[in-house]
Image (spheres, rainbow, N blue to C red):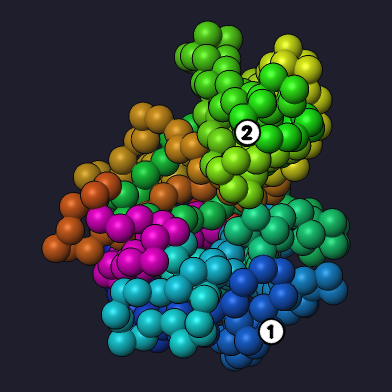
Amino acid sequence: MLKTVGMTDDATLLAAARADAAWVVDLRRRLHRRPEVGLHLPQTQAIVLEALADLPVEVTTGTSTSSVVGVLRGARSGPTYLLRGDMDALPLQEDTGLDFASEIPGAMHACGHDTHVAMLLGAARLLAERREEIAGQVVLMVQPGEEGHHGARYMLDEGLLDAVPGAPVSGAFAIHISTAFPTGTVNVRPGPLMAAADHFRITLQGAGGHASTPHVTADPVPVAAEIVLALQAMVTRRVDVFDPAVVTVGHIAAGTTNNIIPATAFLEGTIRTLSAQRRADVVARVQRVAEKVAEAHDLTAVFERVEGYPVTVNDAVVAGQVEARAAALLGTEAAVPMPDPLMGAEDFSYVLERVPGAMAFLGACPPDLEPGSSPGNHSNLVVFDEDALPAGTALYARMALAALSG
């Protein structure tokens, strides 16, 4: 029989994460200074590979992106568990004034992906020291292109879930940092955690002319305005409040000057939903509203949908495990059930469509600010409290150790 190896207790694991905090913070700051945007992040990838070089981790890199996949094998055979950290930045000029602020004009780690990578690789260090406790394999998913570029989907297409032949990934966990929650809290819920996000474009074709004779034109400007209002009425009157949707028109363009009625107008926006059924329904309704309102005014509307990320759905059992393990690791007050999902979107959703797993939000609000009112993710002023990083590092490691305890 295989010898049963005891698992590191929570207090010891957290203490180890705190002892390694300087390394994690230094790595985070190195990444923060040199942000890269999109799917191809050569400098970021090089820093990740350097951090993994001294660990017993089998590393492969992506062919279509700058992704990194690491496999850490335990002392005994068993299943495969995935931990994910995303590493791309946003096209945003940083104005935080931090002494480690972005050195790249127009790029910033404003969504905390630098902290995700640092915590994940910190967890890899903890796990490497505890390989005797692991029955199976840990896959480290370090992905580019989360910010709208479908990086997780590229990694899945390249065989991420089969990184260990004969032992496909059977569970997954990810952390997302946020200033919306108090530092060190772990916020999680079963079921939908984040929304599906679709981008739509509507091009109205009418007939232009002189602004003094609108009756001989087909003016797209008031029709564009009517479509915006009709979409708001559609959401409030045709969408069940218990399976909600958000439809926002964020961009309208038409015309060149005051006395010319343009021939065309353009609208674009986003659709956020929390179920596949509602997603399909609302996309169809937005198209119908655009086309029928345009037709009522003798215009035509061309509707285009750009499919975004699916709903991020936490497995109920795994979400419960995250809450319980966070409570044991960090204290019961640090494990906070989320009453409602968020309408942001996340491409970890692609992984959760394939394997049972969960994502949790790690609170990192600076101590001199209030959660929810401090600059948040995607703000050029956002600052994350680095005191939260040991909690995230330890939680990543605990989730893998518990899943692979044999």
Instruction: Give the CA separation, mark 2 to mark 1.
Output: 53 Å
Tag of residue 42: 1
Which mark identifies residue 211? Answer: 2
Q: Quadrant of residue 60?
A: bottom right
Depicted 344 relative to depicted 317: above or below? below
Q: Is residue 393 magenta?
A: yes
Q: Quadrant of the N terminus?
A: bottom right
Q: Secondary structure at mark 2?
A: loop
Q: What mark, if any, has residue 98 been given in the picture?
A: none
Specify the quadrant that holds the C terminus. bottom right
> Is residue 196 among the parts visible in the rendering?
no
Residue 139: image location, x then y, percent: 67, 64
Residue range highlighted in magenta:
374-401
Residue appearing at x 69%, y 48% in the figure: 351
**Point 54% across, 66% down: residue:** 90
Residue 177 placement, left or right of 307: left
